Amino acid sequence: MKVTWSWLGDWTELPESPEALAMLLAKRGFPVESLERGTSFDPTIVVGKVLEVAPHPNADRLRLCSVDVGSERLSIVCGASNVAAGQHVAVAQIGSRLPDGTKLRKAKIRSVESQGMICSERELGLSQESEGILVLPGAPAIGTPIENVIGSKDTVLDVEITSNRTDCLSVRGLAREIASAVGTPLKAAVPLKAAGRAAMPAVTIENPADCGRYMARVVTGLTVGPSPRWLVERIEAAGFRSISNIVDATNYVLREWGQPIHAFDASKVGGNEIRVRRAVKGESLTLLDGKTVPLHAGVLLIADRERPLALAGIMGGLESGVTAATTSVVLESAWFDPSLTRSAARSLGLETDASIRFGQGVDPVAVADALDATARLLAEIAGGEVADAKVDAWPGRREPKHVRLRRARMARLLGMPVTGVAAAKALETLDIHQRGDWTHEGDDEVGTFEAPPFRLDLEIEEDLIEEVGRVIGYDEVPATLRASAATPSPRPMEVSLGDRIAALARGLGFNQAIGPALVGPIPAEARDGVADGDIWELQNPKSGELKHLRTSLLPGLADIAARNLRHGVPDVRLVELGKVYRALPPPLGSEWVEIGMIVSGVPDPWDRPGSDPDRYLELKGAVESILGALGIDSWRTGSYHESCWASGTGVNWSVVEGRLGRMGELAPALVGRAGLGRPAWAAILDLSVLSQASPPSRRYRDVPRFPASKRDLAVMVRPGTTHETLVESIRAAGGPLLQEVRLFDVYEFRDGDHRGQKSMAFALEFRSLERTLTDREVESAIAAIVEALASKHGAEVRGAAGEARRA
Amino acid sequence: MIDRIDALAAEGERAFVAAASAADLEAARVRYLGRKSDLTQVLRGLKDLAPDVRGKVGARANEIRQKLEESFAAAEARLQTAAPETARDVTLPGRRPPIGHPHLLASCLREIEDIFAGIGFSLATGPDVEDDRHNFGALNMGPDHPARAETDTFYLNGGALLRTHTSSVQVRVMDAGQPPVRIICPGRAFRNEAIDATHQVEFHQVEGLYVDRDVSLADLKGTLDYFLKSFFGPKTEMRFCPSFYPFVEPGASVDIRCFFCGGSGCSVCGPLSGGWLEVLGAGMVHPNVFREVGYDPERWTGYAFGVGIERLVILRHGVPDIRMFLENDVRFLRQF
């Protein structure tokens, strides 16, 4: 809420500066978001009249002006091109302090003395930039302090009001908080002099629940015209546009008291009768803004005998509104039901300052004060006379709310004892009065407090406890760190496993990314069979690019990789652990953590010299290293086609628990969509399957004490033969002594006798835990392997007559 | 005299050992063994000494000379074996296997989890896609609460929504069991706000909840003071100001003293704050929330707090724009 410094000052003592006020309000729970410092003018800056303008003897672009400031004539050097004889201007004299704080000193300009300065708008702090000097309109009296002509500018504070404190959405409400903090009482309103005579409208309220209170006053003999400057300044600072004195007065009171006021032209109220009633289907009303709205029974109306005059608490009608010809008004101040006002405003699409305020709930008692304030203001600024009579229909009058406060409960919640006297005193500063005295109830003392009518937020004991804390100050509450009786539970396994995987991937050179969960349309290639109905779509998206919840990390990682390549990062390796989402099953769908890895670009030629540029195997190796580090020793791999992978590159890893993950080269369509401009390889792992497959702890296995016998075996196979099937055959044939089978070379023959075949070379390790193996044992195992490879795969052992080389 | 010769010997010895090139070694030879060296001067001056002294000094000087010549020879041999054509260029950069970096948000989140784990908070998690009750209704936000307006919340089909805060996990945890409860819940939250340098539609929060007998605002202050000191450093000053969140009463916003300016006011904390930076929101769990989850508010009291992780990280590390976190520029990631 925007409010000016002097306006608050009408109602309370203020601290020494706006900054100090900002500090004080923050401690009360009302942080000041911005502060626009005002300007005021040194009284020695006065109106002067330029009598003569002569060229400067030593400078082409400067003039020598003779200026009458009333008390004397000054000779002033001026650089502005718009200066001319006969103008009325603002003159700062020697010793004047300008709004920016500088003090004007006697000075010679190009060896001619200047006895003052003719000010520009910028120099007066009226604007950031200005051209030439400010020429004052209307020939104000020479020698008048400039402040009397231009006026000063008030400091404007923008105060954040939390949604529970709607009572502070008014100058008076906020001033009450300040007064409580400063320790002075709130100032009283100026009394209204009402001595006029006028016929009061007859008011009937059809349904008291809709309109708890309806008040009216009549002001006659008004002249519609512009508002005085001080009022315009205040309402403009508050965010209103100045329209006319009568309209401005109602807006002024709205901001000052938080009470919307409506002014009807008294001559348009038919039969001088006001009926507060629901609209009937078929009725319509032309509003102040010229639009005609059809009405329904959910809308409360202010009507005269025949027709609707205004939408209660929302907006006035055009016909009954104030015009330039208006001379007397009926002022309305009322309490309309908050939820009715909200729903009516919403149904008509008309959320106005008034409807918002009524929707929050106004203070039914201040309805009277705000009405009087408006009448008084109209008498002052529009020359009106206020009739002594008034209408006050108050069918919804309610007893004040009483809230019990237990001292022990207060101490228990705040963590510090507060005496009954101190608590009551604190609450008193906020007009929360104690009713009766503290009474004993068991070991406790209980007090009863009356919530003032403007404090709709005070309903329960805890609300009062906060008020006590607020007034005493949260700084007074001690800080204690206590041990808890709650038994800590271990970190969830999946979370810990995720941390481990991230750490392993980082060790392998992958930077950790966190991508957005909200994405644009899911590309067809990345759908992986996810049906339309299984994709979450926002009903109120911010944009088409922030419309769906991601179903896979893949497209997002491709985007991030592409952006990095474009920024010149040569070797992009990223890992992300993040949630993916499905809309099924209803109502909340499902979500789980996926692990995505992506590789693209070129490795650094120095750090990874002569490395195999096969980044497919690089990524596959990284994933398999991670699986190994998690204690997952064995898995099956298989060709696995998905639309996200380039044809023939998809592969998955699976164990009995399920599919651990999958990888491949990114399909060309995805590469193109992300703008990668080069191939990329990606893997997706499933955290929940990994956590099932990863043993929680590992058992010790004997470390071998006897040496291993090593043999290398190179076999020539048909191109379709896979590594995995060969290894399975080797293991099966090699028997229990064969401890390890490692591929160390693959070669595909592109031409020559073996064209179309490939050679695979394996390093075999035979070992027993009990003894050193004999050559014969090893040779017979090798023979069995060679035999098996030949019979099952048609493989031919390369080298000297099928002899495995001794490693 | 003997002392002086011994000192010369030690000095020369060090020079020969330290010589890293043939040029170094030659300079040392001239200085300690050359014709104009101090040692040669001593030997030349022997004739002027008294006969009894002459014998002693002469013997010592010759002994030293021989030792130095040996050292010289050793140094020469050492330099020759490391002849330039076979020596490594030891200044070549090592081959550095790349090491990945954690995302700054992830590492800070982990750090925060560890801080709270150290004072007995367990980790709880909940879904990003929530229903009305967990995100609003059970948190004392009736149907008319402004946070429900479409401008703030992203809605999905069938009444589901994206949680606007991790406070929804509070409700899930309290629904699931009786007090005492001492948990934190980190996670993503979503708000339909205008995106700028300090606002992103998705961001991370850590929610904290402690329910027990006689938990007080003082305990909340103590806990957050411990947390903020752990995260921002032991000299961190904290203050509580009143604030409003529907699910707590009393409510507080928590500020720390600006560590850029030390509280004198700067562009980070702003001219009006008195040097305080708001870092999180907190308060005592509202009795209506307890009733909603079946806890007796007379028997139990509790506090809750919610921390925006991006905000803390931006403040501690000086990251200029919240959007950088989801952009994942490797040049940014690699800095941490």
Image (cartoon, rainbow, N blue to C red):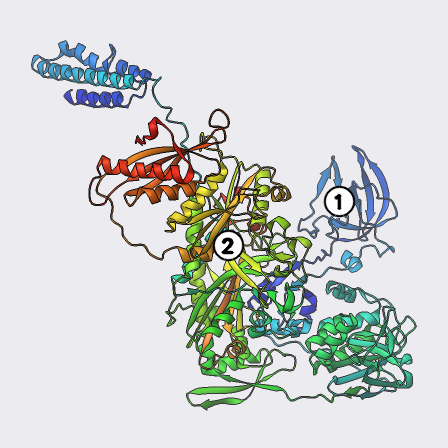
The quarter of the image holding the C terminus of chain A is: top left
Task: Give the Cα separation between the discs numbered 2 and 1.
Answer: 78 Å
Question: Measured along the vertical axis of the image, is residue A125 above or below residue A3?
Answer: above
Query: Could you say whether the residue bearing mark 1 is in a helix, strand or loop?
Result: loop
Horizontal placement of A667 versus A396: left or right? left
Q: Position of residue A663 (x, y in %)?
A: 51, 46
- The crowd level at tag 1 (other Cα within 10 Å; few <14, some 14-19, many 20+) is many
Horizontal placement of A375 versus A620: left or right? right
| Residue assigned mark 1 | A115
Say which amino acid is labelled 1. Answer: Gln
| Residue assigned mark 2 | A594
Can residue B332 be seen by looking at this rendering? no
Q: Where is residue A733 in the image (x, y as percent from the top left)?
A: 33, 42
Residue closest to the eye, A285 or A700: A700
Q: Where is residue A309 in the image (x, y as percent from the top left)?
A: 86, 79
Horizontal placement of A608 versus A564: left or right? left
Can residue B217 be seen by looking at this rendering? yes
Q: Residue at x 66, y 63 (%)?
A: A158
The quarter of the image holding the N terminus of chain A is: bottom right
Quadrant for residue B203, please give it: bottom right
Say which amino acid is labelled 2. Answer: Glu
